[in-house]
Amino acid sequence: MILYKYVSLGSAIEIIKNRSLGFTCLEDLNDPFEGTNFGFSDLGDVSPKCATRAFKNNFSRRYAVLSLTRNPLNPLMWSHYGDSYKGVVIGIDIDIAALTSESEFIIPAHMGEISYVATKNRDLNGVPSIQHLDEIKHELGFKNEIQNYLKQAFLYKSIEWGYEEEIRVIKSLLNFNYSYHDTHDEVINDSWDKRRLSSLGQPLFCFKIPINSIKEIYLGENINRLGCRVNNGKDKDQFKENLNFIKSQDCPIYVCEPDFSSWKLKARLLESCFR
């Protein structure tokens, strides 16, 4: 199965050149409601608010998230995540990329479909005791309960986000020796690239993928506007080099453009003679 990653042109270059996909921490995602759907009851000695914050803070440093989607021709996704149609969508075969590995990932791609709901869970889990809150500081999770808590933390979002058609892959960071604010790179193992900070100062955990797992590439209709806005000659040359690098990949390259007979996008195959 092919799933898709919407990114800027610069991020697409990083993904393809480094052959890796960046996982990010829960607290660095763009929805403040992430990791708050535990449904704790208010009948115990720990308030649902305190319990939820404790769990979210713990999960934020214990797990990393890769977000993918089913549709490369989603107009809202292109606007919100594809750099306003100036970016790139990369189609990844999740089996070849080993994103379905149940030994590598605590939630692999084939188990990571998001449920979009109108209301949050309520009174689902009771209230964790003070002892439970102390335990999660030292343990990965509540043994038999961990899968349930993980699903609630990572696989539920408000119905307003339903347009994303998101599929997630979740990695445990238990064996990663790092501090959130570390600025140095660190090699984890053969499957994981160096950990490096993003341009926003957020840590990325980069999972290596084989180049043949990249099966399709889509260019946004406005991608050439990036070059038009560059005045510096050196930067303009760099833009052309980056764009030509994307177009040179050994997989079908498409340009996304409006279908003027509808509100949908269509993909036009970029012929090899124009690459």
Image (cartoon, helix red, strand yellow):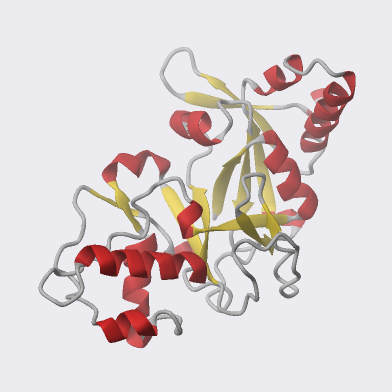
Q: Is residue 162 above or below residue 35?
A: above
Q: How many labels, in total? A: 0
Residue 170 screen position, x and y as percent: 50, 65
Q: Which sits in the foreground, 42 or 214?
A: 42
The residue lying furthest to the left in this view is: 43
Query: In screen coordinates, is 15 left or right of 62?
Result: right
- Residue at screen point 83% across, 22% down: 236
Residue visible at 75% across and 62% down in the picture: 184
Where residue 31 sits: x, y (%)? Answer: 40, 47
Residue 260 at least partly seen: yes
Nearest the viewer among 149 and 203 is: 203
Please indicate whether residue 92 sits to the left or right of residue 141 in the image: right
**Where is residue 224 drawn, in percent x and y?**
71, 20
Q: Quadrant of residue 190?
A: bottom right
Rendered image quadrant of residue 42: bottom left
Q: Quadrant of the N terminus?
A: bottom right
Residue 20: quarter of image:
bottom right
Quarter occupied by the C terminus:
top right
- The residue closer to the viewer here, 119 or 275, is 119
Up/down of 175 relative to 232, above or below:
below
